[in-house]
Image (spheres, rainbow, N blue to C red):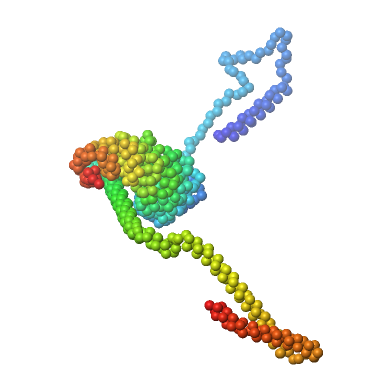
Amino acid sequence: PSTPEVKKQRKAQKKLLARKLSQEKIRPGTPEPVEGREHVYVQTELYLEEISDRIIEVDGECQTDEFLDRPSTPLFIPAKTGKDVATQIEEGELFDFDIEVKPILEVLVGKTVEQALLEVMEEEELAQLWSHQRAFAELRNAEFAELQRLEEQDRRIREEKERRRLEHLEKLRKQKETAEKVAARAFAQRYLADLIPSVFSNLYDSGFFYDPIERDIETEFLPWLMSEVEETLQKKVLGRMMLDSLIRMVVEKRLDEFSHPPPSHQTEAPAEEPRATDAAPQVSGEADAADQPVAEKEETDQPVAEE
Amino acid sequence: MAQPRISAYLPPDIDPTKAPLAFGRRALPKLNEELQSPELLTQQRALMALCDLVHDPEKVYQAIALGFLDNLKTLLVHHDQTVRQKTTEVLSIIALHSIGRRGLIQNGVLSALTGLLDDPVDICRKNTHQIFDMMAKLPEGAGGVLRAGLISPLVLKLKIELDEIQELILDTLCNCLRVEVSEALAAGAVTVLKEKLSHPSTAIRSKAAWVLLEISSHAEGKIAVCKEGVIPVLVSLLEDTQPEVQVNTTGALMFAAVTPQGRSSAMGAEGIPPLLKLVAEETSKARLNAIKTLTLLAEMPEGRQTLLDHRDTFQRCLDDPREAVQRAAQIAITVIEWKP
């Protein structure tokens, strides 16, 4: 029976009980006990039995088992027929590990060792190359230094040569100079050797050595004489010039008078004329008279002047 | 339920820091695109993968053909230090291949690397100097380094950098100065090198001496070396016990003594006795250089006088197995016995 059904039964029983209890209260009961006494329910049967409101109940269930699924049919294994044969790979029958592993191991180890060797060789080669390069660098440096040394030497020698050559040239030049100086000196000496006599002769010729009196006369007397003569001559010349100017004036006046037409003032003119003519003939007479000696003197003057 | 992922753990040989590589020819182009992505993690993973790939020369050739170098140039100035470090590492590995070197020169990466000389991270700087070092070993590379105007910054860095980086700088300088020396002289390289000659580390001393050698192989270098008074320091360094230092010092003296001032300076610094000692040692590597230096000193009359007494040392050098040493000894004897 499922649980809700059981629960329903129990509820129904409780209800019955509840009804019974209520019905029992209504019914008259036994009279009340006397003081000091108590009523007690007692069973008088032979065998006591427990009386309780509660009915002893015993649940009993019955249930059919769940229907199980039909189990699967077992595998049909037919009865064993034939012979039993077993096989097993024993040690050493498939392959011999030690022999077979050899080539593999060889390859593995060989490759590793080869790689290691390669690397070591490379390092060695590199180290060799470096040392080779160092050696070469050393050689190169040494040769370079040698080259520089030789260059230096060569430069020094050339400089030395140059210096010596310059020195030599200097020496030659100085020598030449001294030779020239000596030659010039000798020549000058020779040239100047007869300088003194020639100087003296020149001086003598130019009159540096003189007789003082003669000189005195020459320097003082003769100039004075000459100046006096000159003065006299000048006076003469002056006189002649005066005369010349006089004559000229007269001649010009006459020329003027003769060239001018006779003026309107005849009275004055003839008065002047006669005076002028008076004066003029006188003057001309004098002039004529003086003319000839003057002309002579002029002539003599002119040659003198020409001289 | 079956899933394509077999287990929750990644396979053991996948490196999570590296970007997964596409197959075959597609690997490098894909990495190129990833390098340009705006996300930092992608760039970093792509760079890590690239680092491993560039050990292969064929990949280097392909990378240069694809134009990786421009991308790497832009990444050089990235703000993240891992990116910069990995980029410089990639470039230094590229510089180990000859195609890579050529590509670096053609793309002008050297000038871009100039900015990294002041990087705060040591490894970036070290990688940068490694790149310069590898480049300078080639004549075109040395020309590129000179054209990028790197000499004066390198000389300045020489004063303040770490030791191992100093070694790299000295290597770079000595290869570059073989070509041209005026820039370095203008930057005051001789003074710096003079200090380095007294450095406690052997490698630095020998390399500094080597750089001085290269400087003094040029004429202006010789004048500068004499003026700075480096020759007495070099002579005192001849007493050093390390063979590389000896070799380079004698080489530097050899070149410096070509000029008369250098010679007189070396004589004045009492250079002859240690040089004779070096010549007398049979197995010294510095023998050749020492003989040459003594030859140069013998050009001077006082030198000749002193060395006339030591002619037998040179006679013994004639038995040296190296032909160069024999020749040098012969020349030395001729010069010593020369009478004006």
Front residue of A96 and B176: B176
Q: x and y percent of residue B100 in the render? A: 38, 52
Q: x and y percent of residue A1 in the render? A: 55, 34
Q: Is residue B193 above or below residue A12?
A: below
The residue lying at 28 percent from left, 44 percent from top is B299
Quadrant of res A84: top left
The residue lying at 46 percent from left, 50 percent from top is B112
The residue lying at 23 percent from left, 45 percent from top is B338
Front residue of B28 and B194: B194
Q: x and y percent of residue A98 in the render? A: 22, 40
Q: Is residue B214 above or below residue A3?
A: below
| Rendered-image quadrant of the N terminus of chain B | top left
Q: How many marks?
A: 0
Q: Is residue A26 above or below residue A129?
A: above
Work out which residue is located at the far left of the displayed protein and give it: B319
The residue lying at 71 percent from left, 12 percent from top is A33
Residue A213 appears in view: yes
Front residue of A137 and B267: B267
Residue A158 appears in view: no
Q: Is residue B131 left or right of residue A236?
A: left
Q: x and y percent of residue A32 in the render? A: 73, 13
Quadrant of res B242: top left
